[in-house]
Image (cartoon, rainbow, N blue to C red):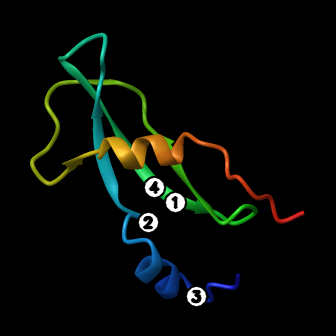
């Protein structure tokens, strides 16, 4: 399936190039940022995660939705090979 340009990709998946935060389950005083991007080889969303940061997340970041987190941690079911 050819999705075309990046604008078409964002219409298809509004989470692309969005930055979220994720709280550390072992230390509630730490968080990290998570950027969602598309893997060009599998056409599957992936996460780029930062290191844990001590503090509170900025107000402009949203929490990473649990369903999105489970989706980006899965392997794609169909490989294009």
Q: Which mark is residue 37?
A: 1
- 11 lies left or right of 27: right
Q: Residue 58, percent across and down?
A: 14, 43
Instruction: Please report contact status of discs 2 and 1: CB closer than 8 Å, yes or no.
Output: yes
| Residue on which the image places disc 3 | 5
Neighbour tally class for label 3: few under 14, some 14-19, many 20 plus, Cα within 10 Å: few
* Circle 2 residue: 16
| Disc 2 packing (10 Å; few <14; some 14–19; many ≥20) | some
Q: CA distance from mark 1 to mark 4?
A: 4 Å
Determine the residue located farthest toward the right in the rendered image.
81
Circle 1 Cα neighbour tier, 10 Å, few/some/many (<14 / 14–19 / ≥20) = some
Q: Residue furthest left?
A: 59
Name the secondary structure under disc 2.
Answer: loop
* Residue extending farthest front: 77
- 10 displayed left or right of 61: right
Determine the CA span between mark 3 and mark 4: 17 Å
Residue annotated with mark 4: 36
Q: Position of residue 11 (x, y in %)?
A: 41, 82
Distance of label 2 from label 1 (alpha carbons): 5 Å
Task: Count how many numbered circles sit on residues in the image.
Answer: 4
Question: Residue 28 in the image: x percent, y percent?
Answer: 19, 17
> Distance between the Cα atoms at labels 4 and 2?
5 Å
Query: Image quarter for residue 33?
Result: top left
Q: Secondary structure at mark 4?
A: strand
């Amino acid at each position: 399936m050819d999705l075309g340009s990046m604008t078409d990709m964002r219409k298809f998946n509004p989470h692309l190039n969005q930055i979220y935060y994720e709280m550390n389950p072992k230390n509630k005083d730490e968080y990290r940022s998570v950027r969602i991007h598309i893997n060009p080889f599998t056409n599957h969303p992936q996460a780029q995660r930062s290191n844990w940061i001590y503090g509170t997340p900025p107000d402009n970041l949203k929490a990473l939705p649990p369903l999105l987190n489970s989706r980006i941690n899965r392997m794609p079911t169909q490989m294009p090979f």
